Amino acid sequence: MSVVKRGMEYIRTHGLSYTLLHGTEKLSERFLRTYDRKWKTIRPDASELAFQCSHPLHAGCISILIPVYQTDPGFLEALLESIQNQTYPDFEVILYVTGNRTETDYVLRRYADSDPRFRVYRGDENLGISGNTNRAAEKASGDWIALCDHDDLLSPDCLYAVARCLISEKSDVVYTDEDKITENGRVHTDAHCKPDFSPLLLLSSNYVCHFLCMRRELWDAVGGERSEYDGSQDHDLVLRLWEHTDRISHIPLIAYHWRTVQSSMSHRNLEQCIRLSCRAVQDHFNRTEPGARAEIMGDVLRLRFPVPEQTRVDLFYLTQENTPIPEVVRHQEGAHFRLIPLNIADNRFQVMNKAAAQSEADVLWFLDASVLPLSREMGKEMLMLALRPGTGAVTGSLMSPSGKNLHAGFALYGPGFAMPRQYGVLKEAGGWHILLRQTHEVSAVCALCFMISRDRFIPYRCLCQGGLENVDLCLRLEQRGLRQAYTPYAEARVRPHPFLLHERNEEDARTMSEVWGQVRDSSWSRSLHPGSPRVHLKIPHTEGDRYEESE
């Protein structure tokens, strides 16, 4: 496909305004170095690195596995130098080398001869990235296994941050944020600021990626990496690690720099990587959730979960007296759903509490009259998630008539306490790392449209008059270990409504701040502005900010 045709297809899918905005941002990152300049203001300075060196941590030896095959010697030297400059000294680097390249051999010998922590082993046969990584692991003697590509870079405080997290959180698995660097290593681009561990998002894509570190015993328990998944081998690995532990910690620090080399598997064959990811997720389902399915839809994974035939849902349609009920809402009724209009002319939340208390259904669905489902399947899409263990409230994709996102969950942030995530972004464009098109966890959902198992519903406390009342509900659900979920496949149009919180009730925000204090949003990075279509970075600048969330 020609560049012009690809451009026209992108405009058709994403819209002209988003295409121009996204293109401008990418050009700005590449040529004006907007993110690169930000990165230079937050990377650790000499005094910070000196402080780390003078305050050693003792988390055990970290074995960094690096399979080396026909690696550019300049890339390899830059990587090894970035590791040698780590402020956490208790590590070993296991380099498993296949293929012949004289200049690369020279770099390997120089580091191995000058620093005993760098150990080089050679194999006669290239076993692929998984096979070579597994061979490297056989030679490792550390307490921890960490994975690193042969042409990327670590920030000098990467291992120190990992050790700090391992000690403070007693983690089994740790991952960091990351960004990309240009092939020449001069410009940082495309920061990936990740949420804390998000099972639904992991099932939708390998958002964990780099830098990844795990207990040696856990690596041995899962059997290392599997060659049949080369291209998505790390996704398969993390899924299997999760089957053995839920002590998986996220360090909100850009500590890994992924070099954008066009020869890498993820650049050469994205379609094959997605197919392998889908297969890995399906294998995970076969082991842990029989009946669940993963399938490819475009460039993302769609998740489908079984719904028992006997499941019953009360659909509470929240409306004023004598308001007509649209046909598409009536058509939600069927095998699982019973439609019950609720008059909310008085106190909405007291009415909802009473309805929940009187219901005998398995699941409750609260749907405001301002929300118009786009298909008869909307309720079924939400129901698949609402029945899963560990899930609290579930919401769908609430959009404007032009297809722009108006609600896909809230980010807990700023003076208004909660803000709609990626407000105004075209749904089909995907937004930040295509989250709008993936099933994933969110910290809070809107009262206009959500579904919840009846035995997980907590009566409203009626602290607030507006949309923040539902945020309070979601925070109390999270206290009970229940995560809220968003599915892009339950689509609806929504009329402007104060509960969308684009216009916030200041009194309610003060009440929530008094009750909850400063809340940490586990599903949205604090380095992002939630309420902007640009989703631009707001990266912290101080040493305290840099490590606060891993303490």
Image (spheres, grey):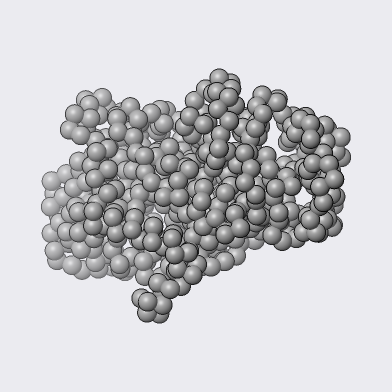
- The relative height of residue 278 versus residue 110 in the rendered view (above or below) is below
Which residue is farthest front?
322
User: Residue visible at 57% across and 59% down?
Assistant: 402
| Residue 492 occupies quadrant | bottom right
Quadrant including the N terminus: bottom left
Query: In this orientation, does residue 24 appear?
Result: yes
Residue 515 rendering spot, x and y as whole percentages = 58, 21
Q: Nearer the viewer, residue 120 or 268?
A: 268
User: Residue visible at 74% across and 53% down?
Assistant: 379
Q: In this view, does 436 lie to the left or right of 135?
A: right
Residue 141 rendering spot, x and y as whole percentages = 33, 43
Q: Which of 387 and 88 is in front in this view?
A: 387
User: Residue visible at 84% across and 49% down?
Assistant: 339
Q: In this view, does 237 lie to the left or right of 449?
A: left
Residue 304 rendering spot, x and y as whole percentages = 66, 58
Q: How many marks?
A: 0
Query: In this orientation, does residue 245 appear?
Result: no
User: Residue visible at 80% across and 59% down?
Assistant: 327
Residue 491 rendering spot, x and y as whole percentages = 65, 56
